[in-house]
Image (spheres, coloured by chain):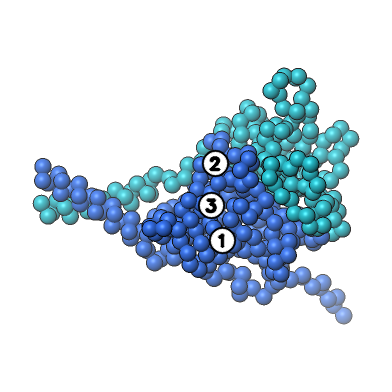
Amino acid sequence: MKYLISLVVGMVVGVVAFLALLYYNPMTSQNILSPLSVSDNEVITFNYSAVATDALVFTNDGKSTVAPYPSKVLQLWEPTVRLTDAMATVLRDGRNQPAAIGIKFSSRSESSRILNGEAIIDSAWHIYVPGQGSLFVEQQENYWGYLREIVVPAYRSSGDNWRGNWNGTLTSGPGALGTARVFGGSGEFEDLETEGVEALSAKAYSVKHGPVAVDGMLSVELPAPTPDPTPDP
Amino acid sequence: MFKTFIAGILLGVAGAAAALHYFPAVNQFREQSLIIVHPNHGNTEFFHVNIPMDRVMIGAPSQKEPLPIGLEWPVDSRFADTRAELFKIRNGKDAVVGVASRIAASDVSSGDIVEWVLHLPARGSAYVIMQAEPLEDGYRTGNLAAGTREFAPLVGRVSEQWVADTSGAEDAPVGRIEITTAFVAREVEEE
């Protein structure tokens, strides 16, 4: 009997040790430097609040930590969309002026690999910038750093919240450098194919309400126009 | 007994690693695909949106009854000619399979635009640019401009059409937006 108890206790210790190793693994730390920060091209940025009540509309399955907003919005409770969030929000430019309407779909991804520190969300932005055109942004976002450094500490805190300063790049693909794919649809952006990066800046998180003070920033690189070839004299 | 304890630790580590490796962290629910496959390897698929029950949001200025209730559309004049909508989308069996956004807008730079993003969580997203003017028979057609995952290697056309309900049933929708996609692999199209 004592051997069996010893084996079970050992297994519990092993599981806990393994999970601790995963959680504290320094090899899976979040990348805070945007790949676009070294670009020579123009980069346009769209800022938004990632707090649900600051959005025009935020909806999910209605059972998650973050409650849908407004409260009477249709919820995504059907099995096929239960792991998906949809948000419509006003995107602001660098001067904090309303610049665009953005709609974001975020679905938990089957490519998530906890062993590799990958908590992946497949997301798509549909953006309309009045006077400039429309954009479609496809990306995979890795929330492992966000979960590890904000959400888990909030649950461990006696006050059930987290406060601090956390900045992290969420975009982890599908681009080779961990960038999003961006396609232009109309206006100045028509036929544009370029890259983008989304980052979060968090200051407060509550176990009860989710993000309390979290801002998002979506950056899109605008390739320099290709000069017309000079005719051979 | 100490050796048993050590063996237990090793078993625990191996078991946790195996569980995380073999059991998916996320398993998206899938509805059976209802696709018509064509001889050129292309396929046609039918989606629809029941109105008003599948409409999540109508974002437009000066609405008497905003949807959802409590929506505060920005009063900025930049968005005066913008209409953004959110829907659930259904397959041929009337099962919800995803969500979609539709943006209709007009400005000097872009002219009139109508665009869709169809987002099917288990399959990917499709970005569709429609012709602004509908055809005479009420259809509006457009092209797949970009896709993700399952839709990434595809090209093709999409049509939308408003179909009013004529059943007269008490719980019937007012009508439905029918979306038909006709996609083929980019390589096949180029051949």
Task: Give me the C-alpha separation between circle 1 and circle 2.
Answer: 21 Å
At x 73%, y 61%, the residue is: A98
Q: Report the residue marked by disc 1.
A: A214
Residue B108 at x, y percent in the picture: 87, 58
Tell me the shade of chain B: cyan
| Real-space CA distance between mark 3 and mark 1, rounded to the nearest whole angstrom | 17 Å
> Which badge, 3 or 1, is on the more N-terminal residue?
3
Marks 1/2 in contact by CB < 8 Å: the verdict is no
Q: Which badge, 1 or 2, is on the more N-terminal residue?
A: 2
Residue nearest the observer in this picture, A111 or A163: A163
> Judging from the image, what secondary structure is the residue with disc 3 in?
strand
Mark 3 crowd level (few <14, some 14–19, many ≥20, 10 Å Cα): many
Q: Residue A39, position in %: x, y?
A: 64, 73
Q: Answer left or right for B14 relative to B96.
A: left
Q: Which mark is residue A62?
A: 2
Comes first in the chain, label 2 or label 3: 2
Q: Quadrant of residue A78?
A: top right
Q: In the rendered structure, the residue with mark 2 lies on which chain?
A: A
The answer for which chain carries disc 3 is A
Task: State the residue at coordinates (51%, 53%).
Answer: A210
Labels 2 and 3 within one chain: yes
Q: Amino acid at mark 3?
A: Ile
User: Which color was chain A given?
Assistant: blue
Mark 2 falls on what kind of element? loop
Q: CA distance from mark 2 to mark 3?
A: 18 Å
The disc labelled 1 sits on which kind of residue?
A: Val
Would residue B150 appear left or right of A185 to someone viewing this image? Answer: left
Question: At numbered mark 1, what does the secondary structure look like: helix, strand or loop?
Answer: strand
